Image: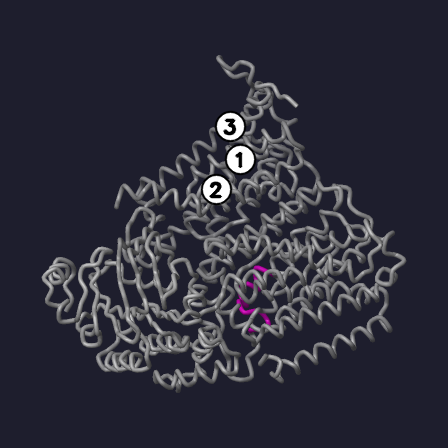
Amino acid sequence: MSLLRCHGITKRFGGVKALSEVDIEVTAGEIVGLVGPNGSGKTTLLSTIAGSLPVTAGTIEFDGRDITRASAHRRAHAGIARTFQVPRPLGSFTVEENVATASMFGRHATGRTAALERARGVLDAVGLAAHAAQEVGSLTLHERKFLEIARAVALDPSLILLDEVLGGLNPSEAALGMDLIASLRERGMAVIYIEHNVRAVATLADRMYVLNQGQNLANGTPAEVLNDPRVIEAYLGGPVDA
Amino acid sequence: MSVSSLALAQTLLNGALLGCLFGSIALGLSVKWGHLGVADFFHLSLTLLGAYLTYSLVTELLWDPFLTLAVTVPAFFAVGVGVQWLFHLIDAQPFTTLLITFALFIVTESVVSMIWSPDLLNLRPLLSDGFTTSIRLPEPLPQLAVQPIDLVALVCAALMVGLAAYTLRSTRAGRAVQAMRQDAAIAETLGVRVLPLTLAVSGLAAATAAVAGMVVSLRMPLTPTLPLQWIGIVVVATMLGGLGRPLGALVAAVVLMMIQNAWSLWFPPQWAPAVTFGVLFLFLALQPLTRIARERFTSGRTA
Amino acid sequence: MNALRDHALWRQFVAVVGCAVVAVVVVPAFGSDFAIAFGFQFVTWIVLALSWGLFSGNTGYASFGHGVFFGIGTYAAAAVFRHSDAPFVVVLLAAGLAAGALALVVGLAVFASSRFSGDLFGLITLAMAFVVVTVVSNVAFLDGGTGVFVREHTVGSWAGSSTSHLFVIATGLAVLAAGVAIATSSTRWGSALRSIRDDEQVAESLGVPTYRYKVLTFVASAVLAGLAGAPQAIYLGYVEVGAVFSLNIPLLVIMMTILGGITRWWGPLIGAATVVVLREVLLDVGSPELSQIILGAALVVVIALLPHGLSGAIPRRRGARRVPALEGGAR
């Protein structure tokens, strides 16, 4: 049974159609790669699933329930977590307080003390334990990106939406990140994973979706998708990825 | 209660012309709010200050009211630049700028009442008949009359708003201002010199307050609390017209004043100020609907 | 629940109660009439500053409508006094409820759309002030434009018989406000509010029901201000629109909170003390306009030089933590 089922997702900004009739399905515990040229609507799709953006048309079902009109925090409670492409830590909180906020208000809401305890556990898992008491301003880019993941994990989600968490990282940091993403699957979470670097996605993903100009272009196993002539054309026609 | 169509027409006309004055006050607010991100209460105070300066120059130095602009316009330009420079120096957030302009608003009220006294000051008795005798409209509407000063308000509003709208839409500098509002960092890399441009916009906005202030001093008796009476209509017109759209603000001010004046014909006039806010809250409540409508309308074009 | 076990919080609250008890015993017993009246105004300002900080300081949504909630409370109290013989407790509740009801209606509407954050929220709360003033000055039940004499209705009651009693009531309200402020300083509630200030969209994505928190906290803040309006009505004796809804009130409240700083719960408290003393000193200047000018200019200087206020300028014990200056709501 599928965990997430999006059907006919359409999103307009004023007169611009960012998404049109997009379908996507995710089964519990799998990593789904979401790729596409710049401006193909990947992040927009993620935001509509997370509830940050309302859809113009279409339905979103999660865990067998229709959540199309549910607010973002309700989806977080239901088990959907997201990261932001450009990390957005809460600036007046320490690293551990950032993560604890997710535990405090997430799926299994807890009190402050318990939340801080759980936050330290999560920070340990992503390798940020040493920075727990620091203010977020002192973090490097890769630490900020991992903090995004830590916050999402602290919600204890069944689906986690990752928006270019490896972008801008050096190869060794990116390798750490890929291990981290793989470990999410081992913890039973499904992942929708956006990355500009198609190769990184293909390595991790069980299945892939390709978007082009706000529409479904192809989906299937990484091997199927990467050999699809339409996909090759979309990428070569658009900006070529190294 | 029945009201003759003539009285209604005259009331609407008066409302529209008074709306022109408020539209020219809203001009500066709209531009600064929309393009500099500064919701500037102090702009209203500047308008008041402009009115009082005109009053003093006319009554004490016996200047022609229009000649006073030669002093007030450059002076206010400098003030506008100065305030924006302060915001730049302290790297002010929108909320901080709002607080500062609010504080300056209160300060100006006190300064004005210290210098000019809190009493009513009226310039009209000192003006030549040419300013105060009402003019009948030409055929086919000879029963309607307008005050000459209202025509001055109309001309000033049309000139300033028209010029501002044209500059924003069709000149290089205007487009630079628009780009800056979208994203200052990108505009900077595209060669827009952001700081000089913001200073200039702020200065020009303040300069329009000098003109509006002159019209105010000719149009109504002055008290230090006038901005409190204007703030509702001006802010609401700015918001209804769309931030950063001077023409929209002018149209909104004209329509609002026409509604307010017409209201006074049928209902207790002391409720008129609430009408403005009623329109605002109606507008806010209808926001989601208008957005849907706009999406329906425009979707066909680009989809 | 955990907050109840947090000893540091309790210690702070006990200290506040202790100070209040000492003040309630000492000031009426030894203070002159002037000192008692001054004390009453002082604690009223503390209630207003703390309650403004509760919502606007914590969430970054700057409200210019705090004077309206205070004024509504004052007028609700005056109306109950004038139209009934209800005991003071009822008057107090009516004042709080009236302010809370207005905040609930406005909050439910304004927070429904993310567009009305930042300066737009500030202006809407200001617009609310103008609407309320128009309504109050035109509705005869409340005022109708002539002002309301309260003294004749209250002079026989316990609350109305002496300013010391008003001081006791207002001090009680200040303790309540401080209690709420302490509670938000390090509880889930406080974390939710500050996450809204930092980044509302992120807060939502972390499961914080931002709408509910904003509406409820806005209401709580308004109720506290409204409660303070009840003793104020008695203190004024004659209630009149111009004075009750003066724009100076929100200005001073904001000034106190900004001056004191919003990064600690007690920031508004020392801000209130500073401004009240400054105003008292400025009374000697003679002209009210001049003192107004000095206050306004002082606010500009404080904002420019001390973005975190006085309390923010004092380093924390457990390692300094930097907090962004109060910004207009999250985007």
The colour scheme is one colour
> Could you tell me how far apart the alpha carbons at marks 3 and 2 are, in whole angstroms?
25 Å
In the rendered image, residue A88, in percent from the top left (x then y), is placed at 39, 69
Asked if the residues shown at circle 3 and circle 2 are in contact, with their CB atoms under 8 angstroms apart, the answer is: no
Residue at 59% x, 55% y: name it. Answer: C64
Q: Which mark is first along the chain, 2 or 3?
A: 3
The reply to whether label 2 and label 1 mark residues of one chain is yes
Residue that mark 2 sits on: B240
Determine contact: label 2, label 1, CB under 8 Å.
Answer: yes
Q: Nearer the viewer, residue B226 or C215?
A: C215
Relative height, residue C314 to residue B221 (above, below):
below
Indicate the amino acid at tag 2: Leu
Q: Main secondary structure of the magenta part?
A: helix
Residue marked by disc 1 = B256
Instruction: Specify the segment rendered in magenta.
Output: C299-312
Q: Position of residue C155 (x, y in %)?
A: 88, 56
Query: Which of the chains bears the disc numbered 1?
Result: B
Residue A159 vs residue C137, the one in the foreground: A159
Q: Residue at 70% across / 53% down in the picture?
A: C71
Residue B152 numbered tag = 3
Tell me the element at label 3: helix
Label located before the other in sequence (2 or 1): 2
